[in-house]
Image (spheres, rainbow, N blue to C red):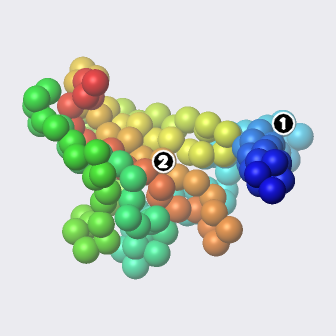
Amino acid sequence: MVTAFRSSLLVAALVIALSACRQNSVQNHAGGNIPVYESQEFQDFYEKFGTDSVYQMEHIVFPLEGMPALQDTSDVIPVDFKWQRESWIMHKPYDDMNGTFTREFIDFKGIVIEKIADHSGRYSMERRFSKLPDGWHLIYYRAMGLSDFN
């Protein structure tokens, strides 16, 4: 009985691992691959996420994994910290504040990681988006604060 249970767990883990290894780029009209964050589907989601508060709330996985802003290197974050629906502050469209901030997108196996930082690199934030069965969702948020949090 224990062996059958272990076999089932092994099969489940294998299925998850194989699905994580799927091709995550999108094929463009010329036959080449583009990062997921450059797809029209993600671009449409991202624009609406930043401009429609109802849509934004419907596309966040609450309680949301992440970290609050660190103001000081001595700040301690509770191990069980999660963002809650009731205290969520709406995210607005990206603004580079006249060149003060830069933004970078990374396609990590179909998860879109967005990093925004000031030019010194001292302050940054991170959001992670994943495509779930009912569309794109925010799955992680580290608020703008000190970048050196380790």
70 and 46: which is toward the camera: 70
In the rendered image of this protein, does residue 57 appear above or below residue 2? below
- Contact, CB < 8 Å: mark 1 with mark 2? no
Residue drawn at x 38%, y 64% is 63
Residue 24 visible in image: no
Q: Is residue 138 toward the left or the right of residue 12 in the image?
A: left
In the rendered image of this protein, does residue 135 appear above or below residue 28? below
Residue drawn at x 29%, y 34% is 124
- Local SS, label 1: loop
**Three-letter code for the amino acid on which mark 2 is drawn:** Arg
Quadrant of image for the C terminus: top left
In the rendered image of this protein, does residue 111 appear above or below residue 91? above
Alpha carbon separation for disc pair 1 and 2: 25 Å
Quadrant of image for the N terminus: bottom right
Residue named by callout 2: 128
Q: Is residue 85 toward the left or the right of residue 78 in the image?
A: right
Residue 43 visible in image: yes
Residue drawn at x 25%, y 38% is 98
Q: Is residue 73 toward the left or the right of residue 13 in the image?
A: left
Q: Residues within 10 Å of mark 1 (few under 14, many from 20)?
A: few
Which residue of the protein is positioned furthest toward the bottom in this rendering? 54
Mark 1 or mark 2: whose residue is earlier in sequence: 1
Residue 86 pos. (x, y %): 25, 74
Between disc 1 and disc 2, the foreground one is 2
Residue named by callout 1: 32
